[in-house]
Amino acid sequence: MCGIVGLVREAGSDEATVSRMSEAVRHRGPDDSAIRTWPDHGVTLGHRRLSIIDLSPLGRNPMANESGDIWIVYNGEIYNFQALRRELEGLGHTFRSHTDTEVVLHAYEQWGDDHVHRLRGMFAYAIYDRRPRPGPARFRLLLVRDRLGIKPLVYYHRPDCFCFASEIKGVLACDGIDRAIDWSALYDFLTYLYVPAPKTAYLHVRKLPPGHQLVLDERGITVREYWTLRPGHTSGAETPAEGVHLVAETLGRVVHDHLVSDVPLGVLLSGGVDSSAITALASGMVKPALRTFSAGFDVQEHSELEYAAAVAAHCGTRHTERVVGHESLDRMLPRVLAMYDEPFADTSAIPTYYITAAAGREVKVLLAGDGGDELFAGYTWYATWLAHRRFDRLPGLAPRARLGALADWWPPGRPGKGLLTDLSRSPLGRYAALMELFSPHQKRALLSPDQAEEFAEYDDYWYYRQHWREDLDPLTRLQYLDLKTFLPDDILTKVDRASMASSVEVRPPLLDHELVEQVFGMPAAWNVRNGERKWMLKRAVEARLPSAVLHRTKKGFSAPMTPWIAAERAWVEQELAASARLAAGGWLAPDLADRVGTYRRGAQVWGLLLLQRWLATETGGASVAGAGVGPAAETPVFLQPSP
């Protein structure tokens, strides 16, 4: 795994600036670094290397083809690179290294932009094509992000500058960057717990969405989708038993492929079904004993260490545990902001950082079970949402707007208020209510009065809405939505930044796109049978795991933030008051610090702590009065999705 940066300026190449950008993402690749400039095009590329495959200097980036007219800076792992290499060698290509990077480079040379369809893996990379082109084009720059969004890539585009990096901090290290805040992104954060793609907290810094390519040429930038998930009965399995057989077969192959490494590796073992399945499969493929690592909490109701230990003992792994407590909050607040570069409120970022940091002292690569809940319908909110669908079928109901008005009027705490609120919501609104950090009403109460007015007509759920598929059956609709939103912007973002802060690569085998397409090609009902979630996955690995692990109650991997906040109440109030003084610029309500007692969920308070501290740091106490929804960032050209 690596960190990549690049800069294109009409004024000419700029090695000093790219050196600062590279240093900003040093943690992503501490083993080696290199920068290359091309003054004729004003292009500079930089790379930080975390050596995983082919540890020799031949794996150094930027890397060129034989003729030196195509260059790449690359971050990722391609699990079918050896088969692709043999195919490319048969077509006449020659290789100098044993890296997957060079395979991607030659694949582009052979198949152009369509090369990405041949790659299985996680990746984010840039290809600089210097070959002579017809017309006014002097060169072409291609940016690519993997299908599911496992690896990050952000970019900045203004008339005089284009730059990109693996993380926002890499872009911000470029001199002359317009750091204007995207206030709508901060408002979105209060809904989603994260800033949804393609936004960042900065108006002119944008995330390349998963499954997309960006081309920079004489036309400017063009962003296009090259892959999207297409659910349907396409797997070939005719019965649930056939589905289980296909899943078991594919999962075994996928885990085997994800174990390719020239350095030590292990597994992040939470004790849940997903990571336990990965552990059970990998333990039979790795010699000597597989290393496993688990994080637990000082609040027993949230800790799964006993289940992780049972799986480790059953599979014969060398196991390490780390217990995380509430005393970590004051240390983790600035660290979380430094890792994510913008407010990010998933509380499990804290234990993820601690356990990957501990693992990093022994291994460089970790496998994880991320994606299993989206793929095999494991989230508890699926059952809750499906149960509430009965509200849509009740006859004689008043229009939702009238029910909503009645719910707003109904006194808090009086029986029936929750039911009225649920009845007033649309199906998408009920899903959003299960996921959101703050409701639309709560969000506007957090803002100063003039800012609340600015956002009065804002579509709070625009991100969910653009991926809401009425054509899909209800369960698949939720899985698809989470795969497009919550998974890349929350789960995968959390794991990437938290692990790479300690220079550790995390690989999620369950998100191999061939497995994802296969499972979504089966009826959703095969994932939930007789009330049992993840039915297919459990049947596929039941011979390898204890029954107590497969059939226990799901907890989920989230920090016990509510009791932690209660234990640190004095520090929380002091922090909010201090941040409020520093960030008293007019965007948030002036008495926000006094309202902390009104929020019962620790995640809400943690989100406010992060937002307040980020604003205090970014604005330096300057006034932000009048900053509302604001103008849209410069918009690239978007083409239709590829077939």
Image: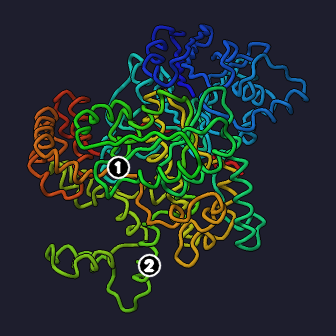
* Crowd around label 2: few <14 · some 14–19 · many ≥20 (10 Å): some
Can you give x and y, in whole percent of width and height, for residue 514 in the image?
Answer: 70, 51
The alpha-carbon separation of the residues under discs 2 and 1 comes to 25 Å
Judging from the image, the colouring scheme is: rainbow
Marking on residue 610: none
- Residues 554 and 108: in front is 554
Judge from the rendering whether residue 78 lies leftward or rightward of residue 379; answer left or right.
right
Q: Residues within 10 Å of mark 1 (few under 14, many from 20)?
A: many
Residue on which the image places disc 2:
389
Residue 462 horizontal/vertical position (percent): 42, 56
Q: Give the residue at x 53% y 58%.
A: 273
Left/right of residue 635 with respect to residue 324 in the rendered view: right
Per the image, label 2 sits on a secondary structure element best described as helix
Q: Nearer the viewer, residue 394 or 452?
A: 394
Label located before the other in sequence (2 or 1):
1
Left/right of residue 32 with respect to residue 607 in the rendered view: right
Residue 501 in percent (x, y) is at 43, 29
Q: Are marks 2 and 1 in contact (CB under 8 Å)?
A: no
Q: Residue furthest bottom?
A: 396
At horizontal 28% and vertical 48% (from top left) the residue drawn is 298
Q: Is residue 426 above or below residue 57?
A: below
Q: Look at the image and tell me whether residue 151 can be seen.
A: yes
Q: Is residue 194 visible?
A: no
Check the image and report above or below for 159 versus 308. above
Which residue position holds label 1? 193
Q: Nearer the viewer, residue 533 or 220?
A: 533
Q: Secondary structure at mark 1?
A: loop
